[in-house]
Image (cartoon, grey):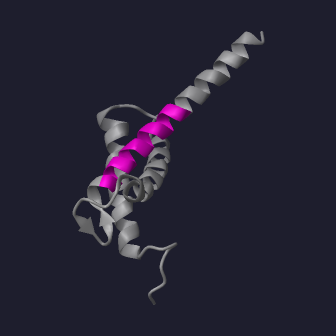
Amino acid sequence: MNAPLIGMSFASFLVLVILSAMAAGLVHWAFRFRLFEGADGFIGQWIVAWVGAWLGSPVLGHWSPMVSGICVIPAFIGAFAGALAGTINAKVMAGLATQRGSSSK
């Protein structure tokens, strides 16, 4: 059975999963910039990083070594940017919610 997963093979999906896990781990544990504390924060960053890795090559171009049809460097940059942007977005929204809640009192 050779059914693609929305335009990609299973091997390409696994490459994106691995690259996004590395980028989310870098943001979560190395830079200690966390969406939430614990494993749920890492999984949230991992999901957003996967979307960033998936969009990395189409946005940044196809210019690095390929593994299973995935350009590794643009996908990793996209995954890192996705994890970072997702975390920043969540922190900004949480800050706005607390500002809005404290100003209404």
Residue 79 colored in magenta in the image: yes
**Residue drawn at the location 45% of the way across and 90% of the way down:** 1
Q: Where is residue 93 drawn, in percent x and y?
A: 60, 29
Look at the image and say whether residue 82 sits in the magenta stretch.
yes
| Quadrant in the picture for the C terminus | top right
Q: Main secondary structure of the magenta part?
A: helix
Seen in the image, is 48 located left or right of residue 101? Answer: left
Q: Give x and y (percent) for residue 46.
A: 44, 50
Q: Give coordinates of residue 82: x percent, y percent.
A: 44, 45
Query: Where on the picture, by quarter, is residue 8?
Result: bottom left
* Residue at the extreme right: 105
State the count of labels: 0
> Which residue in the rendered view is the most extreme toward the left?
65
Where does residue 80 sit, x and y in percent of width and height? Answer: 36, 44
The residue positioned 48% from the left and 36% from the top of the image is: 87
Residue at 35% x, 73% y is 11
* Magenta range: 74-89
Indicate left or right for 3 with 100 as reference. Answer: left
For residue 14, what is the image quadrant? bottom left
